[in-house]
Amino acid sequence: MSKSNIILGIDPGTQLMGYALLKTEGNKAQVLLMDVLKLTSHKDIYQRLEKIHTKVAELITLYRPSTFAIEAPFFGKNVQSMLKLGRAQGVAIAAAMQAGLQVTEYSPKKVKQSITGNGNADKDQVWRMLQRILSIDEKPQYFDATDALAVALCHHYQTSSPLGNATKGFKGWDDFLKKNEHRIVKK
């Protein structure tokens, strides 16, 4: 019998924070929740950070996820925006760690690659693929919610794939071939 897991996926932000809970059992995945935390009504950044921490802690208490996956900030040109995004991510991670959850970060490119096969896919392409994979009908109002779901599904793929650990410990094909010479069939 396969074990059931709940993954909490977060798309961090200081104006909108996307969150999603994905229940997985073997290869099956089911969306439990997908939404956003709207923070624009709070002008003070510290108040926003407190709201992020409170929401993540609340989700952990209500749904008892076994793992926590978050999208890592991408590098942008606006230093102030990057600083704010990093703080939002840090507060969400702190809430997860405080609850004893293992934290895994994924780059936006890795998430897109996992879901669509294309690391440069746009948000709509990611959403359409999520619809197909998870049989979701209604489109959410914000892509931040679907981004969080994509992070959770990416984590599921990375941790449940039989190939997930196969390439760990290797530094490219040359290293893999050197460490696996006994597998090479020479004709």
Image (cartoon, rainbow, N blue to C red):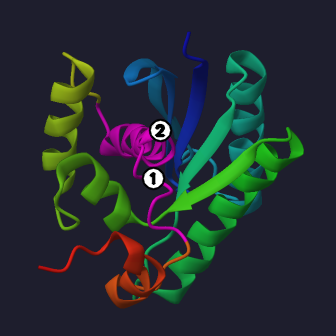
Vertical comparison of 174 with 52: above or below: below
Q: Amino acid at mark 1?
A: Gly
The residue that label 1 is drawn on is 164
**Res 96 → quadrant:** top right
Q: Nearer the viewer, residue 30 or 177?
A: 177
**Res 56 → quadrant:** top right
Residue 141 spot, x, y in % from top left: 29, 32
Q: Residue at x 79, y 46 (%)?
A: 95
Vertical comparison of 61 with 97: above or below: above
**Res 157 → quadrant:** top left
The residue range painted magenta reads: 141-168
Residue 132 lies within the magenta run: no
Label 1 neighbour load within 10 Å: few <14, some 14-19, many 20+: few
The kind of secondary structure element at disc 1 is: loop
Q: Residue at x 23, y 65 (%)?
A: 119
Q: Is residue 37 left or right of residue 185?
A: right
Residue 157 lies within the magenta run: yes
Numbered circle sitting on residue 155: none
Residue 147 spot, x, y in % from top left: 37, 46
